Image: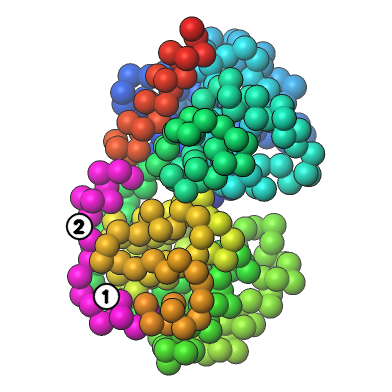
Amino acid sequence: MLNPTGGLERVVQLWSVGLSALGHRVLLIDRRPSEQPPRAARDGGATVLDATDDDLEPLLDAHGVDVVVCNNRPFTRVGRRVRVDCFHNYPQGWDAAGTVDGVALRQQLLDTTPTAVSMALANHIESTFTLPEGSVATTPPPIDPLFAAASHRGGGGILFPNRLMEKKGVRVTLAALDHAGLTNRATFLDYTTPFLRTSSEFMELRRCIVDAGATLAPPCTPAQLAERYADADLVIAVATEPEGLGLVPLEAQVVGAPLVTAGPGGLAEATFAPNVHCATAETTELAGAITARLASPDVPPRSAVLERYGVEGATAHLESAILRARATQGA
């Protein structure tokens, strides 16, 4: 399995834990810049190695790798091996340089085994690349078990735990909270992608939160985040651009926190009734959903979320895609 960079790394690590538990020999490869020294480690039963583009294929040869799962990296060359491409984001996030050869990529998706973390994303990939219906499997991501170890208690107000980015709906959430008269009960985590911490977008959104009268709280570790979910009276997750799925809603629901989500993409799939998803991130609709959800104590059972998104359930879907890839590409 090829490690992604950024926030989805833990998803790949947990998949490797699940696959190792099923008896598969797993090699996790972290794509490092060439100037960084190589490393080797163990993680949940998997061997963890670093590789550049140049030394990747020789490394796969040396370890006898016959199946490669690439996460959000459809342009990585892995030689003549059985290949599963697992997508966590919409196509515009696969190639920041904008140099995709759409024809070649479509042929690769036809020849290999593409998967996506949500049905919404799978359907979008099929439509965008005119693939046969049902050709993109769904491989739900696993939730870190530490969130299932926390128990909801409430009393801590409204929590917005996502990154402070325009596409994460910070402004529309502030507008909805203001419309509902709830801004002073809201806490936003002072968190974004590390290389964006000095960006004008991040600094402006921080100012908006403070000026609105909401609380800006320090970023936290996963264990601390689980406790914040446990304290929250409501968790809000919003997207103004299509979201592949969204781990925040899943983590919050496993803890037992009430939830409201809004926006396009996979967020609707990540929201279990009686929690509420708004199809559009529109101020009045979102404000009404927040108010209504705060008034209801009901939450979905943890088992409903864990059945699909626990490590065991999520790994079963990925293993099924791997077996399908072996059967079709090895034929």
Residue 51 visible to the viewer: no
Q: Quadrant of residue 2?
A: top right
Q: Is residue 173 shown left or right of residue 305?
A: right
- Residue 250 sits inside the magenta stretch: no
Picture coordinates of residue 59 (x, y %)? 63, 16
Disc 1 secondary structure class? loop
Q: Earlier in the sequence, mark 2 or mark 1?
A: 1
160, above or below 155, in the image: above
Q: Indicate the position of residue 125 as horizontal and vertical percent values.
A: 56, 40
Residue type marked 1: Gly
Q: Dot 1: few (<14), some (14–19), or many (≥20) neighbours within 10 Å? A: some
Residue 112 visible (yes or no): yes
Q: Is residue 292 magenta?
A: yes
Q: Residue at x 39, y 66 (%)?
A: 277
Q: Nearer the viewer, residue 35 or 325?
A: 325
Find the magenta span and give its range: 290-309
Quick one: SS at disc 2? loop
Answer few, some or many: residues within 10 Å of disc 2's Cα (few below 14, many 20 plus, some between 14 and 19). Answer: some
At label 2, which amino acid type do we have? Pro
What residue is shown with label 1? 154
Q: Nearer the viewer, mark 2 or mark 1?
A: 2
- Residue 255: horizontal and vertical position, in percent? 28, 60
Location of residue 135 with respect to 166 vertically, above or below: above
Query: In the image, which disc is placed on residue 301?
Result: 2
Q: Please state if 173 lies on the left or on the right of 102 as rendered.
A: left
User: Which residue is found at the position 74% from the left and 72% from the top?
Assistant: 200
